[in-house]
Image (tube, rainbow, N blue to C red):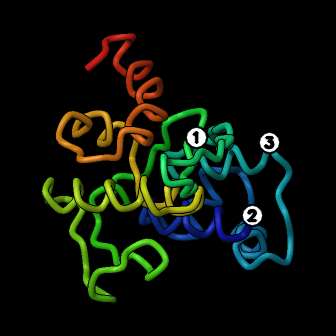
Amino acid sequence: MATLVAQARRASGLSQAEVARRAGTSRPTLSAYEGGSRNPTLDTLERVLAANGQHLVAVPDPVFTRHRDRRGKPFYVPDQLPRLPIEAALGTIVLPPHVDWSPAGRPRNLAERSERLLTYQVVLAEGSPQDIQRWVDGALLVDCWADLHLPAAIRHAWQPLVDRARGGVTG
């Protein structure tokens, strides 16, 4: 909770005093929330977030199903497409060795479509559910779906999610 309150204030660029004033609380109380020595009620948390120009959103956790390709190698498919914050969806990342067997530590700039295509191909084939949630954005995946080179089993298993995102249009 403390991290959420502190991140919200830093993202807004406001001082503790200004957020406290807008939220109807004191600066020492806000500081205690940010430091983790006190926890706000849900109502207070909503007021503090609103003072920072933010709000709470409940996002369902995806449920992953384990599949196997024709060679028996496992891969995972969620029941809903993951969405990432824009900084993560278009950031520069380094995939861990269990996902990417190419030269270790090679940065991948997801803002570059060609890099994103290669990254998504590797993550969908080699990644764990956590890897998929960390590096694959559903909207960007749908956008580049036709250009991804995926094994048939992986493409077939993910296709219903892509179709649903497109409103039932296949491709």
Relative depth, front residue between 84 and 31 = 84
Per the image, the residue denoted by label 1 is 78
Tag of residue 63: none
Q: CA distance from mark 2 to mark 1?
A: 27 Å
Whether tag 2 and tag 1 are in contact, CB under 8 A, the answer is no
Q: Which of the two discs, 1 and 3, sits closer to the camera?
A: 1
Per the image, the residue denoted by label 3 is 43
Among the 4 quarters of the image, the one containing residue 135: bottom left
Q: Position of residue 149 (x, y in %)?
A: 23, 47
Tag of residue 1: 2
> What secondary structure is marked by label 1?
strand
Q: Residue at (86%, 70%) from the top-left corner? A: 38
> What secondary structure is marked by label 2?
loop
Q: Residue at (24%, 72%) from the top-left corner? A: 108
Q: Is residue 118 above or below residue 10?
A: above
Among the 4 quarters of the image, the one containing residue 119: bottom left
Q: CA distance from mark 3 to mark 2?
A: 13 Å
- Mark 2 vs 1, N-terminal side: 2
